[in-house]
Image (spheres, rainbow, N blue to C red):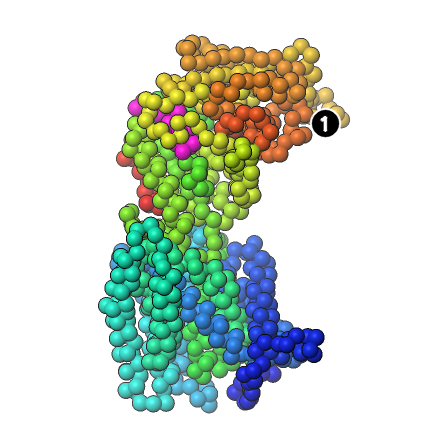
Amino acid sequence: MAANKTDSSIVCYAPAMITTNGIWQGDNPLDYSLPLFILQLTLVVVTTRIFVYILKPFRQPRVVSEILGGVMLGPSVLGRSLEFANTVFPLRSVMVLETMANVGLLYFLFLVGVEMDLSVIRRTGKKALAIAVAGMVIPFLIGVIFSILLHRQEDGMTQGTYILFLGVALSVTAFPVLARVLAELKLINTELGRIAMSSALINDMCAWILLALAIALAENESGSSLSSLWVVLSSAAFVVFCVFAVRPAIWWIIQKTPEGETFSDFHICLILTGVMISGFVTDAIGTHSVFGAFVFGLVIPNGPLGVTLIEKLEDFVSGLLLPLFFAISGLKTDISSIKGADTWGVLFLVIFLASTGKVIGTLIATFLYKMPIREGLTLGFLMNTKGLIEMIILNVGKDQKVLDDESFATMVVVAVIMTGLITPVVSIIYRPTKRCISYKKRTIQRAKPDNELRVLVCIHTPRNVPTIINLLEASNPTKKSPIGVYVLHLVELTGRASAMLIVHNTRKSGRPALNRTQAQSDHIIHAFENYEHHAGCVSVQPLTAISPYSTMHEDICNLAEDKRVAFVIIPFHKQQTVDGGMEATNPAFRTVNQNVLTNAPCSVGILVDRGLNGSSRLSANQVSHFVAVLFFGGPDDREALAYGWRMSEHQGVTLTVMRFLPGEDTVEVTAGDPINHSGSIMRELSQQERERQLDDEYINEFRTKNMNESIIYTEKIANNGEETVAVIRSMDNSHDLFIVGRGEGVVSPLTAGLTDWSECPELGAIGDLLASSDFAATVSVLVVQQYAGLEQHEEGIDMPDSPVQQDDQPITWQQTNFRGSNMYNNSN
């Protein structure tokens, strides 16, 4: 704190003052170490979370919020008050706070090691290696130059050590933080994102080696140079021991545990103790304790053991203990120590030149590999991401007296500013060009009957898979009109950025799942691939989208645009309970659905999943389904009928089309305001008449072409919403699936008043009725919304062919296999 300079203070500790006897005994809880630590931890977590919430709209990585939280509590802001500093963060508490922070750091680096896949480096190729090296060399040289300007001989720091620390701090790229930034920018699964991640991984490994060397020099600068050599040799021996002794022992534990069973508490405890021992050994030989924990994590094989360790430690370590480390970095940062305009000028010059150096170095490498300048520029900015490794370097440097207060504060400010600028700058300079083609056949109604039907299926959990597979099989895939299915597993983006990269980018088929999310992906992919294997004329491509729920619809809509699908199927946000009722699974799913309905570039279907008969059956010739289409009129209902029409061509599907017509006592309603001019009312009535004409034409076409026994067509007369509900409730319970239009923008006397009681307006009046818990029949419902982009062409049914017609010709699966595409990644 401002008044707490440990360089010139002697602090006395009272070992007995751990827990208080209570305020009723006259004790002040803050005089005792445990209550004080609890208060400090609470303050750090709360402050950090407040900054996370404030910076969320700016899409800043969490590390920025954690450092700013520490700066807020430290001598730069709140700590300027001596009363606050001496009460909440007294000098006697520093030892406990830093010890716990370093324990958290130890286990976090262990988890990073467990999650990291070194095979990535082997597969990156020369391009990523060249970018990583070029992105390090120039900033390192800039760090060398500025270390000469910033270094003062009277500080007692050797020039060589200072150069190494400053050079590494400026040249390092934070691998976990970069993954989060790329995911926020929707670049994580692009070719650019993969190159950035691979380069950052190589950069990180180089930084660890340089950090070990820097610490060896810093801790032994007063001794002979021979001692530094022994430190380096001992560290290398430790790495060799971990690879050739610890790793086989871990393999023995894995092989001793039967497949599918949990690891014993003894083995888990043994490994967690091994983390502490590794930290102790590396600290004892002269490198930082986190180096040992990181290497120990690296030798843990990917698989079920990694899953168990991550699930047991992740939330507690990264959610509670790790923010302590960043907060302490902030507590040590006294911005007021950066004195004078000259120092601030040098600070911004360091930021500018170090950032520019990385950009120039990366541009040179990308130019040699003939990459576009914009991509090279973007990579250069992305490689400027700072975070964990740099903060470790700076803290070690301060502890070893390599960095003084001013230098430390300068470098922390540099780290925060450089990392904070990445997302907004990259958002401006790099916007992947999207093909904005007027593609008219983005509905089932307008799809050519002899073309491939492309469907995008969104999955949150494996629970929806059986019903969706049977729905696809009932959609009548044939050699003449095959179905291309893009299966998109929707995964919420969490703080575990490094695991996200390993799980969804680099894992090979057949290797065990690394965590629960990946296990779910494996189940989903296996089910659809099994369906593809047994079914004919169906091609399946599994993909994964990792996003915050607030922007997940962008992934869905971008993929639908990129793959030019005609129909998106998304699961309803409620699921059926044991007693037949409906309960919400995750409120965020509903927001995703609403956003997709608003922004989708094609037709959308929301599936209310209550099972479909024969859900375990995949054989095409044994499918037997009874499907009902409720037709009220309007574009959405015509799209619903078009889907039902396609289903009716399947030999195992019996289709019932029930058209609702207004009776003689029906009162016409319009959406217009009573004070509207007569002209607007006339236009609205004219539009309604136009829609009725289109409905009649489509129904007549449907009836003319479908006179077989598997289709039942009936018409029902109703005068108002109550009679409509009565007719629907009177239907028999033999159906497996209802298909209804959403009815968006359609004003009908047959549904008048029903929307007033809707629980879920996104389903429309009839869809909401069928999906409600009090509806007698427990039947799956598909609510369809037709792509509204056709309205501008709605002058007639026959439209001229699109100028991109050649792209719409029948395409075989080999041609549409986009595995490892530029937008998404195959999780398989």
Q: Is 479 contained in the magenta span?
A: yes
* Residue depicted at x 57% and y 25%: 776
Q: Give the residue number, with chain letter if any, for mark 1.
A: 673
Quadrant of image for the C terminus = top left
Query: Residue 98: where, in percent of width, then height?
Result: 50, 75
Q: Amino acid at mark 1?
A: Asp
Query: Residue 585: where, in percent of width, then height?
Result: 53, 42
Side of 213 relative to 334 (left or right): left
Report crowding for label 1: few under 14, some 14 to 19, many 20 or more residues within 10 A (C-alpha): few
**Rendered image quadrant of residue 44:** bottom right
What span is in magenta? 466-481
Question: Tag 1's secondary structure?
Answer: loop
Side of 333 relative to 158 (left or right): right
Query: Residue 547: where, in percent of width, then height?
Result: 47, 48
**Rendered image quadrant of residue 632:** top right
Quadrant of image for the N terminus = bottom right
* Residue depicted at x 64% and y 12%: 663
Q: Nearer the viewer, residue 119 or 61?
A: 119
Q: Seen from this angle, which residue lies furthest left?
A: 244
Query: Residue 237: where, in percent of width, then height?
Result: 26, 75
